[in-house]
Image (spheres, rainbow, N blue to C red):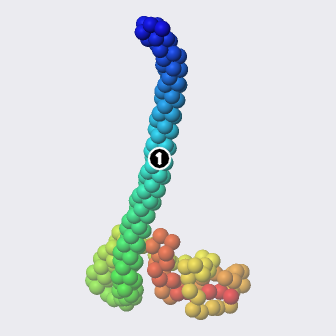
Amino acid sequence: MSEKNKEVKEEEQEKPVAENCGEACEESADAAEASAQETAKEQPEAEKDAAAEELAKAKAEAADYKDKWIRSVAEFENFRKRNAETRHTSYMEGRADILVKLFPVGDNLERALSMCDDNTKKGIEMVLRSFRSLLEGEGVETIDPAGEEFDPKYCEAIMSEPAADGVEPGYVKEVFLKGYKKGEKVLRFAQVKVTS
């Protein structure tokens, strides 16, 4: 055989091998590319899952912090209101305590009014009007239940007397000491004589 023929034969023999190798290489390249794509798909999905988990965790923490913050604000607001109410109540009770100490002064002025001459009577009436004006300014009302039915919410029975004919029992016959109230709170109970 001539050298030329040998070369052609070798080329033909090499061709199938090269062709076979090309096909195998292409398959191998396709497999590698598919594997790389799968790895690329898996990796972003894993990253996406991790990011989604972190986001969910962060959202849960944010919701928890927001809930705690709302509760803290509400608790502080309730505390502030309770504190303001307590201060107001204490202040009003302190004022009421002072008023209670003034009631005997009014009682003595009324007693003095019944036992003095005309000139002194005018002066005492002026002082008594000022006293009553002070009580009105503080929202204090007098409890004077003479002739009314006995009410233990406002009166204290210190004496009883049998009811006369035609008079029902349980009525106030005489008031010894007037009572005072502010709103519905009794500052001093009226001391009375009751028919029985």
Q: Under tag 1, what secondary structure? A: helix
Q: In the rendered image, is residue 19 in sight? A: no
Residue at image position (46%, 80%) is: 187
- In the rendering, at what x and y percent does residue 149 appear? 63, 77
Image quadrant of residue 165?
A: bottom right
Please say whether residue 140 is visible from this viewpoint.
yes
| Residue 93, quarter of picture | bottom left
Label 1 Cα neighbours within 10 Å, binned few <14 / some 14-19 / many ≥20: few
Q: Where residue 68 sits: x, y (%)?
A: 44, 59
Along the line of sight, the residue nearer the viewer: 175 or 86: 86
Q: Nearer the viewer, residue 52 or 104?
A: 52
User: Residue 95 vs residue 173: left or right?
Assistant: left
Residue for point 31% across, 82% down: 124
Q: Is residue 104 above or below residue 9?
A: below
Q: Residue at x 56, y 82 (%)?
A: 155
Q: Which quadrant holds the C terminus?
A: bottom right
User: Label 1, on which residue?
Assistant: 50
Q: How many marks?
A: 1
